[in-house]
Image (cartoon, rainbow, N blue to C red):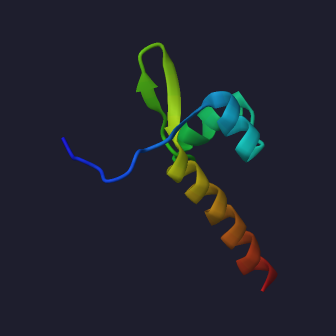
Amino acid sequence: MHNQSHNTALLRRPEVERRTGLGRSTIYARMKEGDFPQSVSLGRTVAWVEDEIDAWIQERIAARQALAA
């Protein structure tokens, strides 16, 4: 097990939906396609690593900017 020097924040699905603008079914479809960060199982619920969601959003912004250039 790795000791991390920072706390890893986890986001529940409603927060992931709010941040990405994607609905539940789209999130799971994109996860299956490999185009969205994988969730972390927390017993009977799931969450996503905040840094991974933020990176996914930034990748979309960078791709848009590359197309505009």
Q: Count the marks.
A: 0
Q: Is residue 30 left or right of residue 23?
A: left
Q: Residue at x 57, y 46 (%)?
A: 36
How far from the left and from the top, in percent, is residue 12?
59, 30
- Is residue 35 at least partly visible in the picture? no
Q: Nearer the viewer, residue 27 or 41?
A: 41
Q: Is residue 6 left or right of residue 49?
A: left
How far from the left and from the top, in percent, is residue 45?
51, 18
Q: Residue at x 75, y 33 (%)?
A: 23
Q: Residue furthest left?
A: 1
Q: Nearer the viewer, residue 69 or 47?
A: 47
Quadrant containing the N terminus is top left
Whether residue 64 is situated above or below residue 24 in the rendered picture: below
How far from the left and from the top, in percent, is residue 19?
72, 45
- Is residue 45 at least partly visible in the picture? yes
Whether residue 39 is situated above or below residue 44 in the rendered picture: below
Quadrant containing the C terminus is bottom right
Q: Residue furthest right?
A: 68
Q: Residue at x 71, y 36 (%)?
A: 17
Q: Residue at x 72, y 46 (%)?
A: 20
Q: Is residue 40 left or right of residue 56?
A: left
Q: Residue furthest top?
A: 44
